[in-house]
Image: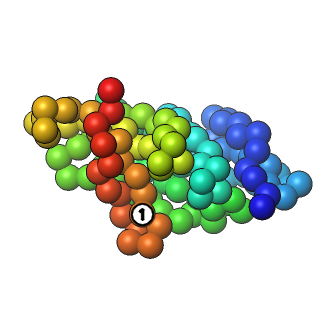
């Protein structure tokens, strides 16, 4: 399987290579982006007032799969690699759940929704 490679964030776009072709996705206010080797997709957080406010997920060819806000009661914090999820979307809440404020969320491609996975520490 071909992998997404060479992710580059520019002022007005995210760019990567896939299948020996350059993919360019026009975007503004990029906060952070990560490649998921597990799902062969690109996750992008867009800047908000204080914390990132929008998550976009793109296929290897640059097709937009999802645009979503943080789950209810949470705010996006950052993206990181996770062995179970590929890319984890770390979210923070002001009301601790099971004693934790920071949680790893994953994206369920079948249900097209975020799900809470485990505490982030």
Q: Quadrant of the N terminus?
A: bottom right
Give the residue displayed 53% in from the left and 48% down from the top: 86
Give the residue displayed 17% in from the left and 46% down from the top: 73
Extreme residue toward the right, this view: 20
Dividing the picture into quadrants, the one containing residue 108 is bottom left
Q: Quadrant of the C terminus?
A: top left
52 lies above or below 57: above
Disc 1 marks which residue?
A: 108
10 Å crowding of disc 1: few (<14), some (14-19), many (20+):
few
Extreme residue toward the bottom, this view: 110
Is residue 86 found left or right of 59 in the rendered image? left
Q: Nearer the viewer, residue 97 or 15?
A: 97
42 lies above or below 29: below
Q: Residue 6: give x, y in percent of width and height.
A: 76, 39
Q: Nearer the viewer, residue 35 or 118?
A: 118
Counting labels gives: 1
83 lies above or below 25: above
Dividing the picture into quadrants, the one containing residue 68 is bottom left
Extreme residue toward the top, this view: 121
């Amino acid at each position: 399987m071909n992998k997404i490679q060479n992710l580059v964030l520019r002022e007005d776009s995210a760019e990567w290579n896939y299948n020996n072709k350059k993919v360019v996705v026009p975007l503004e206010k990029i906060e952070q982006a990560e490649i998921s080797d597990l799902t062969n997709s690109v996750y992008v957080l867009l800047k908000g007032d204080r914390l990132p406010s929008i998550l976009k997920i793109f296929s290897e060819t640059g097709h937009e799969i999802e645009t979503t806000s943080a789950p209810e009661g949470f705010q996006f914090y950052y993206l990181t690699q996770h062995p179970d999820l590929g890319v984890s979307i770390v979210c923070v809440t002001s009301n601790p759940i099971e004693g934790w404020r920071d949680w790893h969320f994953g994206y369920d491609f079948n249900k097209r929704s975020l799900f809470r996975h485990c505490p982030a520490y």
